[in-house]
Image: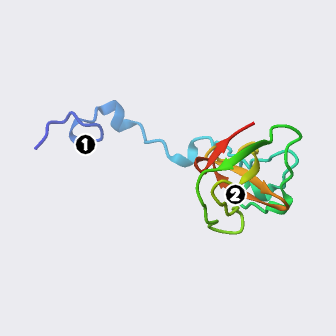
Amino acid sequence: RFSGTFVGNAESASPAAAASPPVAAATLPAVPTIPVVPTIVGVPNTVAEGVLNPSDVKPPASGTRRARVLYDYEAADSTELALLADEMITVYSLPGMDPDWLIGERGNQKGKVPVTYLELLS
């Protein structure tokens, strides 16, 4: 058996601690919480919520770069862009986007592409 050194041990409770009633959680002031929904200027909220509709994404006025694709990449879903090794595409990032991904454009096709499959040029 352990000695009465642990908090909450009935044997070690002081008379003052035993005389005061425990504070119920309901009597503590409630801390208000505000839901945070990321928004990106010029981009519909569907992108900020993780659902990318490539036709809704507009390239930034500046910050686009050319990239050479290093390896073939098969798109996992319609939000991604399939890549072929040695092709050239235009890429850019969006605020709040995962840094391991960029938006890639090839002609009128666009979608997310993994940075590790690219050699960024200009």
Vertical order, 23 against 16 (above or below): below
Left or right: 48 with respect to 117? right
Considering every residue shown, the one lying at the far bottom of the view is 77
Q: Nearer the viewer, residue 18 or 94?
A: 94
Find numbered disc 1 in the image and state the secondary structure of the residue it sits on: helix
Q: Position of residue 38 (x, y in %)?
A: 75, 47
Q: What is the crowding at mark 2: few (fewer than 14 residues within 10 Å), some, or many (at least 20)?
A: few
- Residue at (64, 65) in percent of width and height: 75
Q: Nearer the viewer, residue 111 or 46?
A: 111
Q: Marks 1/2: CA distance?
A: 51 Å
Q: What is the crowding at mark 1: few (fewer than 14 residues within 10 Å), some, or many (at least 20)?
A: few
Q: Quadrant of the N terminus?
A: top left
Vertical order, 117 against 61 (above or below): below
| Residue 2, numbered label | none
Q: Amino acid at mark 2?
A: Gly
- Residue at (62, 67) in percent of width and height: 76
Residue 77 sits in quarter: bottom right
Residue 79 sits in quarter: bottom right
Q: Earlier in the sequence, mark 1 or mark 2?
A: 1
Q: Amino acid at mark 1?
A: Ala
Find numbered disc 2 in the image and state the secondary structure of the residue it sits on: loop
> Circle 2 sits on which residue?
50
Considering every residue shown, the one lying at the far front of the view is 86
> Circle 1 sits on which residue?
10
- Residue at (61, 61) in percent of width and height: 73
Mark 1 or mark 2, whichever is nearer to me: 2
Q: Nearer the viewer, residue 76 or 106?
A: 106
Vertical order, 76 against 49 (above or below): below
Marks 1 and 2: CB-CB under 8 Å?
Answer: no
